[in-house]
Amino acid sequence: MQNFTTPIPLSLYIHLPWCVRKCPYCDFNSHQAPDSLPEELYINALIKDFEEHLPTIWGRRLISIFFGGGTPSLFSAKGIERILVEINSRFRFGADIEITLEANPGTLDESRFIGFREAGINRLSLGIQSLQDEKLTALGRIHDRDYALRAIEIAKRAGFDNFNLDLMHGLPNQSLDDALADLDDALSWQPPHLSWYQLTIEPNTFFHHQPPTLPPDETLWDIQEQGKLLLAKHGLTQYEVSAYSQPNQQCTHNVNYWEFGDYLGIGAGAHSKVTDMNQQHITRHWQVKNPRDYLDPTKKFIAETKIISTNDIVLEFMMNALRLTQGVPLSVFSERTGLPVTALEPMLTTAKQKGLLVDNADILCATELGQRFLNDAIGMFLC
Ligand SMILES: C[S@@+](CC[C@H](N)C(=O)[O-])C[C@H]1O[C@@H](n2cnc3c(N)ncnc32)[C@H](O)[C@@H]1O
Ligand code: SF4
């Protein structure tokens, strides 16, 4: 039933699961680091994990690599360099490959930044979150405003022209003025890219058990609307729910997720989505989540593998594509899912009739209403 004819872009995600300490809002697969980080053992495991996946991606090229976490900047520059060298000795990198590393300002010094740049990292993503000390304390961050600013400064000095700032809004007791002042402050550094996330209270986090006082809905709405205007005024265009960039500075790695490209995930708890052109299907794998299990040589890296059903593929494609402000060309649907565009019917027509999707035969894109009620727009494609 599926028919893949065009090569699918491929990214690599590398999960480094340790942090100095766990933030109270965070539900990522991140763990407080032991006194001595088992860096070498973990890198050995990553390389073995990558080798085991090689047969599924053989002959392709990587368009991006993303070191995510956790706090990848806890690893030494030498360690990051070794990972990149080992991967590159086994697999081809695209000519203009984007290589991002997530960094926590509380873990950085100038020599480490320079080391990352020399190791081949060409995009840095700094977890700033806020530039107000009171908010950083409420978020349980390990750094203050001065440290965050210093991190931006030394990233620039170390030659990272391409960098992202992660900022959150809707923070405990945050007013509209607080949120706009934070954005304004961050924008004065002219970031090529800014990820602006609304704080969500996730199950299994400290905040879920002891909820902080969040701003009322009207304030959250005003923050969103006025924040977007401020970002646009500084030349940062929204291209995804939480992602804003200067022209041509979108994150290749994340865009590949949203356009339903392939990605291999290595490291504890990493996910993969790989298209098998021979078998004509898409497979998902999940690696074991606990770093201790991941490092245990008697255990397998893969916790679960499953072939995605065609119904799930339609929904997953739409869940990703509709996050993109400009949507995706309709042709990308068939290219990436292997399904005919008729697989979207009758849901597509109904979604257009309800005003949730743009009425254009060549593009899949949420309207303003659809963006506002994104879950409803996506829900239309539940089979
Ligand atoms: C995987 S985290 C890693 C970044 C890095 N470890 C750090 O915190 O500096 C990526 C980003 O997700 C955002 N984030 C994490 N938990 C969130 C939550 N509950 N609500 C909204 N954004 C969140 C933060 O902005 C964070 O920088
Ligand atoms: S530093 Fe980042 S990954 Fe680690 S606990 Fe905090 S938000 Fe999560």
Image: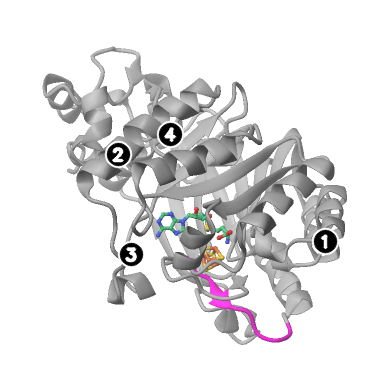
Q: Quadrant of residue 364?
A: top left
Q: Nearer the viewer, mark 1 or mark 2?
A: 1
Q: Quadrant of the N terminus?
A: top left
Asked whether 115 falls inside the magenta stretch, the response is: no
- Residue at mark 3: C-beta within 8 A of ligand 1: yes
Q: Is residue 291 left or right of residue 378?
A: right
- Residue at mark 1: C-beta within 8 A of ligand 1: no
Give the magenta range.
Answer: 28-36
Give the camera-side residue of 84 and 211. Answer: 211
Under circle 4, the secondary element is: loop
Residue type at numbered disc 1: Ala
Residue type at numbered disc 4: Glu
Query: Where is mark 1, residue-wise?
Result: 77
Q: Quadrant of residue 201?
A: bottom left
Under circle 1, the secondary element is: helix
Query: Where is mark 4, residue-wise?
Result: 240
Examine the rendering and report whether any part of residue 237 can be seen: yes
Q: Are marks 2 and 3 in contact (CB under 8 Å)?
A: no
Q: Are marks 4 and 1 in contact (CB under 8 Å)?
A: no
Q: Measuring from the top left, give residue 223's x and y in whole percent.
A: 34, 39
Q: Are marks 1 and 2 in contact (CB under 8 Å)?
A: no
Query: Where is mark 3, residue-wise?
Result: 202
